Image (spheres, rainbow, N blue to C red):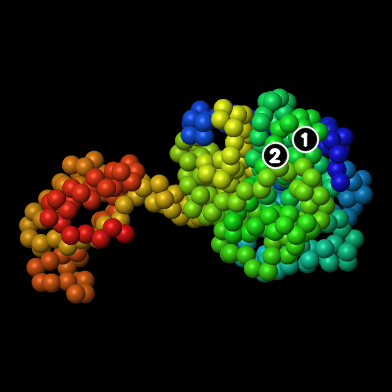
Amino acid sequence: MISLADIQEASRKLEGKILRTPLIRSPTFSKMADAEVYLKLENLQMGGSFKVRGASYKIQSYLSDLRGRGVIAASVGNHAQGVALAARAAGVAATIVMPVWSSLAKQEATRGYGARVQLQGGSLTESIEVAQKMAASCGQTFIHPYDDLEVMAGQGTIGIEILQDLPDPDYVLVPVGGGGLIGGIATAVKALRPGTEVIGVQAAACPSAREALKAKRPVQLEAIEEGSLADAIMVSRIGESNFPLLRDLVDEVAEVSEDQIASAMLLLLERKRILAEGAAAVPLAALLSTQLQLKRGSKVVLVISGGNVDSLLLDRVIRRGLVLNGRLMGLSLCIEDVPGSLQRLLATIAGQGANVVRIHHSREKRNLPLGQARVELELETRGFEHMEEIARALKGGGYRMKVK
């Protein structure tokens, strides 16, 4: 297990090699949560996530041995970029094994930082096994994404920075995947301020931390849901080195749904102009849920762990978040196929202050009576109450419709 002294040593070695990310207060989220809410913005870190901290400390700790041999790692994306950046800065060759389904954007970003990328493995666990075998056969040093003491100590420097900027937080909410991030942060926070509660947050689609706590040991989840927005924390087994810290130092572990994650990502983007990946948004999702019983007016720190979101995924997340928050309304209805009919429909909608985002008008739909046209609409709305007002106005105007 790591200690505060290990993390303090990591902090000294990392000075000037990583960014000290800001801790900012959010008036909006403070009001929404009835608390004093602060965001630790690791999405602004080099490589777009906290991962460069642990990777850099691992490499700096064994630098003289690594220069001639190089390092190898396995990752879905963030750890890959963190290792690639840290290795390039130290003048060390790096090879990254990524699952075959890893996003093209993350593959190219990793190559752009100077690493050699190999696509092997149908899961992160399989990619880790491949990388470990390659490291053993080639004499390279394997850098585990979370189950590694130096990596944990490097991630724990976030905890030191939080307490330097805000000495008296009541709660620190941290994403949980393999456990390296929360293990390091909890070690630092509990040593420096034992009264602060450290709360882990995981995706309900992959509850490996909760299952480990129930079983009192790390357990392998046999099946996890694929395609989670929080792919960076979809780890099916908590790390062996991380579990004792999770068990002894973490006060609670919460779970959040995909819908809650999408809503939190949209809130961060709209209210704070913060681009956070799904795994990084889970602390806000938990804070705004009903499952955490936090003291009113308490000081809460949310660790926004990264901001690496694929562009194509971002569009889907925004749309999903808008739908979940009553900001997009889909309608399907029939109108008479006569001049002025569509204009009258749109005038009714405009009278309710809704904005038409998409419209499709067709006379050729199946089962459509002669003299009728089908209109498919997507409207931008202010919320669920506004949606109900629009529906009432349309019904009052004699329209029969289906809300999609």
Residue located 81% across and 49% down the image: 244
- The residue under the point 84% across, 45% down is 150
In this view, the residue in front, 323 or 211, is: 211
Q: Which image quadrant for residue 126?
A: bottom right
Q: What residue is pinned by disc 1? A: 190
Q: Quadrant of the C terminus?
A: bottom left
| Res. 93 mark | none
Q: Amino acid at mark 2?
A: Val
Q: Nearer the viewer, residue 114 or 198?
A: 198
Which quadrant would residue 381 be assigned to in this image?
top left
Give the farthest residue toward the left: 339
Mark toward the start of the polypeptide (2 vs 1)? 1
Does dot 2 land on a helix, a strand or a loop?
strand
For the point 84% across and 47% down, the residue is 149
**How many labels, in total?**
2
Q: Is residue 370 left or right of residue 251?
A: left
Image: 260 above or below 208: above
